[in-house]
Image (tube, rainbow, N blue to C red):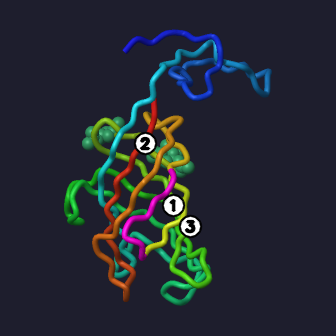
Amino acid sequence: MASFFIYTISISYLLIMLPMFICISDQAFSEDISEAIAMKRMMKTSHLHFYFHDIVSGKNPSAMKVIGTEIMSFGTTFIIDDALTEGQEPTSKIVGRAQGLYAVAAQNDLALLMVINYSFTDGKFNGSSISILGRNHVFDDIREMPIVGGTGLFRFARGYALAHTIWFDIKTGDATVEYNVFVQHF
Ligand SMILES: *[C@@H]1O[C@H](CO)[C@@H](O)[C@H](O)[C@H]1NC(C)=O
Ligand SMILES: *[C@@H]1O[C@H](CO)[C@@H](O)[C@H](O)[C@H]1NC(C)=O
């Protein structure tokens, strides 16, 4: 794909190709670097498919309750470092980790606020990450959550994730959730 220099700012088609190498002057608090960077015209759309394993019970939980006493009530908050796998089984190949937190942010419902960094460790997106910030009404069949940004190949990312529970143990809170992520990036 041809890449070329554009000297005007096109809000929707910006790609900073060289941020690692650009020497930002240490004198100015901010500066316009659009002439110094290469920009590509088209955004790509990628589809990612993986499974999220949230383990609350047992000796090695990947989700730890940090606020709250009951299993799940208004305000209950968990910090997580969950494995993301290619297949549905927890023993399937690990393709990344979901690190962040979720909290019950509804008084009369089981709806979570998700603030999670999904970082990938396999394939072309190894080392790249997406950030999800959104509401997760856990008993809905499909929950949609926005992707608010990313790192690595996902710089300037935006898009959405569709989460679908495969398995949920209401007593312990352990769950396996299927994710279909649609993400636009350069
Ligand atoms: C998300 O993960 C990526 C890759 O591990 C890391 O570079 C980035 O700093 C993380 N972002 C946040 C907000 O934790
Ligand atoms: C992902 O990247 C890291 C760091 O560059 C590397 O050590 C690791 O082997 C890579 N993993 C895969 C599965 O390619």
Across and down, in percent, residue 12 comes to 57, 29
Q: Earlier in the sequence, mark 1 or mark 3?
A: 1
Q: Amino acid at mark 1?
A: Gly
Give residue 68's mark. none
Q: Amino acid at mark 2?
A: Val
Check the picture and name the quadrant holding the N terminus: top left
Q: For label 2, count other residues whose C-alpha is less than 10 Å away and answer few (under 14), some (14-19) or many (20+).
A: many
Comparing 61 with 41, the one in front is 41
**Alpha carbon of mark 1 to alpha carbon of mark 3: how far?**
11 Å
Residue 147 appears left or right of 94: right
Q: Is label 2 in contact with label 3 (beta carbons under 8 Å)?
A: no
Answer whether residue 117 is magenta in the image: no
Label 3 residue SS: strand
Q: For label 3, count other residues whose C-alpha is less than 10 Å away and answer few (under 14), some (14-19) or many (20+).
A: some
Across and down, in percent, residue 77 comes to 56, 75
Label 2 residue SS: strand
Q: Is mark 2 within 8 Å of ligand 1?
A: no
Give residue 183's mark. 2
**Alpha carbon of mark 2 to alpha carbon of mark 3: how far?**
20 Å
Residue name at image x 53 percent, y 68 percent: 102
- Vertical placement of residue 2 versus 55, above or below: above
Across and down, in percent, residue 131 comes to 51, 50
Range covered by the magenta-colored residues: 139-146
Residue name at image x 49 percent, y 9 percent: 4
Comparing 82 with 175, the one in front is 175
Q: Is label 1 in contact with label 2 (beta carbons under 8 Å)?
A: no
Q: Which residue is mark 1?
A: 100
User: Which of the 4 image quarters holds residue 67?
Assistant: bottom right
**Alpha carbon of mark 1 to alpha carbon of mark 2: how far?**
19 Å
Q: Is mark 1 within 8 Å of ligand 1?
A: yes
Q: Which residue is mark 3?
A: 113
Q: Is label 1 in contact with label 3 (beta carbons under 8 Å)?
A: no
